[in-house]
């Protein structure tokens, strides 16, 4: 029995010594270091700010804007009349959905510029169907959505880059729908239209 007690005491003593060795090795110097809270004053930097300004030319991960056409609507500084990616039917449908959400309050569903906000006294935007906008490059619509124009503010922070292009494509579709003539309709569809009109 005394052997068991001595053996147990020996184990407790060894475990205690081992814990003390580990505790001595745990230094908190690297964990308890001086730091600044956000927007706190600093005595270390000459300008007194704890936050450091970004190094010029710094670009956040995923925000490198190398495609001039996609991000500015321009090619070599001039407004482009082409899209930065192929426009599909689903792109047009997405553009219509975004247009209906963000643009119709002022521009209405046909783009004539007499939306609900205009009817209540807000200055009317120009119709998309006037010659100036019919002949405007598609980059113009992207640029206006990005930077604002006249009383229209920028939608850059509300509408993603690709969705702005999709809205611009839908505006082109609206312009075509309101200004198309019968000769632009494919022959098989033209026959259907003419037969429906005759009835």
Image (cartoon, rainbow, N blue to C red):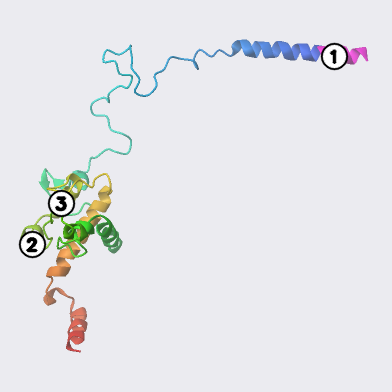
Per the image, label 2 sits on a secondary structure element best described as loop
Magenta highlight: main SS: helix
Is residue 5 in the magenta section?
A: yes
In front: 114, or 87?
114
Q: Residues within 10 Å of mark 1 (few under 14, many from 20)?
A: few
Which quadrant of the figure has residue 177?
bottom left
| 157 is higher (above) or lower (below) than 189 | above
Q: Which residue is mark 2?
A: 130
Q: Which mark is residue 139?
A: 3
Q: Position of residue 154 (x, y in %)?
A: 20, 46
Which quadrant of the figure has residue 171?
bottom left
Tag nearer the camera, 3 or 2: 2
Q: Which residues are magenta?
A: 1-9
- Residue sitting at the far front: 120
| 66 is higher (above) or lower (below) than 193 | above
Q: Position of residue 138 (x, y in %)?
A: 15, 55
């Amino acid at each position: 029995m005394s052997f068991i007690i001595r053996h147990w005491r020996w184990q407790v003593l060894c475990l205690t010594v081992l814990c003390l060795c580990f505790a001595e090795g745990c230094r908190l110097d690297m964990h308890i270091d001086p730091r600044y809270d956000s927007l706190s004053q600093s005595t270390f930097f000459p300008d007194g700010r704890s936050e450091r300004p970004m190094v010029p030319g710094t670009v956040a991960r995923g925000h490198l804007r190398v495609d001039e056409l996609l991000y500015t609507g321009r090619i070599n500084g001039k407004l482009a009349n082409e899209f930065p990616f192929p426009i599909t039917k689903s792109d047009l449908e997405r553009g219509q959905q975004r247009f209906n959400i963000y643009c119709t309050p002022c521009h209405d569903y046909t783009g004539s510029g007499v939306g609900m906000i205009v009817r209540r006294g807000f200055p009317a935007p120009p119709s998309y169907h006037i010659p100036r906008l019919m002949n405007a490059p598609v980059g113009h619509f992207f640029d206006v959505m990005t930077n604002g124009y006249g009383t229209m503010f920028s939608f850059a922070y509300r509408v993603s880059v690709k969705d702005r292009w999709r809205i611009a494509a839908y505006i082109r579709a609206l312009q075509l729908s309101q200004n198309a003539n019968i000769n632009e309709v494919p022959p098989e569809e033209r026959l259907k239209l003419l037969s429906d009109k005759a009835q």
